[in-house]
Image: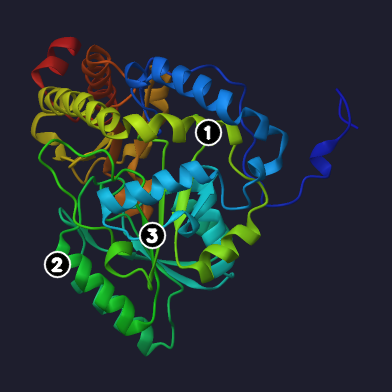
Amino acid sequence: MSGTGFAYSSLFRRGLAEPIKPWAGLPKFNFVGGHNDPERIPVDGLIDAAASVLKREGRNLALYSLGQGPLGYLGLRQFLADKLERWRGIETNADGVLITVGSTQGINLINRILLEPGDTVLVEEFVYFGALAKLQKLGVNVVGIPLDRQGLRPDALADILGELKAKGVRPRYIYTIPSIQNPTGSILPLDRRHQLLALARQYGVPVFEDECYADLLWSGVVAPPSLYALDPAHVIHIGSFSKSLSPSLRLGYVAADWAVLSRLAAEQSDTAGALDQLIAAEYFANHFETHVRGLSAALAVKLDTIVEAVEKEFGSAAEVWRPDGGIYVWLKLPDSVDVREVVEPAAAAGIAFNAGPAWAVDPDAGKSYLRLCFALPSQQQIRDGVAALAQVFFERTGIPLQSSNVRRNA
C-alpha cells in the first residue's frame, strides 16, 4: 500500500508510457499538435446538420453501428467514395472504405495485420511522429528514406531496397505521406509517384499512403492523383477529417483492397462515434468543397503571417520549408543548434513547439529542425509567439542574433 491508497504502481506492466501530468491548459503560444482554426469550425452548419440527420435517422442510434455493419455509417462511406474519386482520383465505392477512430486507429490496425517484432519498415527520414513512435514501440526495424524539397527521393529508395534485398530482407511496407508531407509540407510530383510504385512492384513491397492533409491545399496548388488511385493493388490509403473539419470529431478512414479491408475490420475493437459519423456525413454532403476552400484560404493567410514573422525574428538563421498546404511549417536552424535544449525553457515562457528529433528516424539528424503549427493561434498570436520563441532561442543558443533581440538584451 502507498501512503494514499492501494499500491497500483507495483502492478503496472513494464514498458508503459510515462504518466500524464495534471492538465494545466494550453500554453499561451501553442505551435504544436494538429489543432485547427477555431474561427473556421462551421458551428451553425454542424447544428443544422445534426438536427436534420437526427430527425431522419436518430432512431438508429439504438443499434450498434447504426445497424449498418462493421465498415461504418453508409452515408459517410458514400460521401467518401465520391470525394475520393473527385478529389484524389480513386475509383471505389462505399464497400471499399472503412471508417476509423481518426487516422490513428487506421495506422494501428494496419500495423496489427502486417507487422511483427523484428520486421523492417521503410518511412521518410522526417515523418509523422505518431506513426514513427508506434513503429518504435512495436520493435520493428525502421529505415529512413532521404527527402528533398519535392518529397521522397526514389533514387535513394531504390538503393535502400537493393541493399536490403542483398541481405535477404523484404520490408513489410513503405510508409509515405505524398501530399502535404508531414512535417516538410511537400507534394510528391507525379513522376516520382510512378517511380515509387514501380519500385514497390519490383521488390514486392506494399505502400502505406497517409493523406491526412491532402484536402488543405493553397489556391492554385494541385496534388497529383493519390498513389492508391495509380495502383490500388499495391497501396493502402488512409485519410482523416481531423484537419478538414475538426480534430475532436475522431473520424478517419481506410481505402484498400477487400482482402486488406476485411482484415482491418475484423481487428477493429471499437468503432467511431455514430453521432460524429452522422453529422459529418450530413454536413459534408452539402458543404465539403466550400468549407475546405474557405478553410484553406484562411490557413494560407496564417502561413504568410508565420513565414513573415520567422523571417523578421530569425532572419537568415532559419531556413523555411514553405509548405504547399496544411497547417504547419518546417524550419531548419544552424547545425550548431540543438532544439531539444530549448523545449523546456520555451515551455516555461508559455511557448510550445515540436522539436525536430521526435519527427526524425535518426533523432540527431533532426536536432536543428522544428515544426510550428500555425492553424490555432490568431495572426497576432503568431507574431507575438514567434518573437517570444526567437528570444528564448537567443537566450539559450545565441541564435538568432537579430536587432530585435539585441535591443531587448541591451
Tags 3 and 2 in contact by the CB under 8 Å rule? no
Q: Is 223 rendered above or below residue 38?
A: below
Q: Earlier in the sequence, mark 2 or mark 1?
A: 2
* Amino acid type indicated by mark 2: Asp
Q: Earlier in the sequence, mark 3 or mark 1?
A: 3
Q: Could you say which quadrant of the image residue 338 lies in?
A: top left
x and y percent of residue 104 in the render? 50, 47
Instruction: Say how many tags the image has.
Output: 3
Report whether residue 131 is seen: yes
The N terminus lies in quadrant: top right
The C terminus lies in quadrant: top left
| Residue for badge 3 | 92
| Residue for badge 2 | 191
Q: Which residue is located at x 29 percent, y 23 percent?
A: 392
* Amino acid type indicated by mark 3: Thr
Circle on res. 64:
none
Which numbered disc, 2 or 1, marks the residue closer to the eye?
1
| Residue for badge 1 | 278
* Amino acid type indicated by mark 1: Leu
Q: Could you say which quadrant of the image residue 146 lies in?
A: bottom left
Q: Mark 3 to mark 1: distance in Å? A: 21 Å
| Crowd class of label 1 (few under 14; some 14 to 19; many from 20; radius 10 Å) | many
x and y percent of residue 44 in the render? 40, 14
Report whether residue 245 is seen: no
Residues 204 and 55: in front is 55
Does dot 1 land on a helix, a strand or a loop? helix
Residues 332 and 284: in front is 284
Q: Mark 3 to mark 2: distance in Å? A: 23 Å
Does dot 3 land on a helix, a strand or a loop? loop
Q: Which residue is located at x 55 percent, y 43 percent?
A: 73
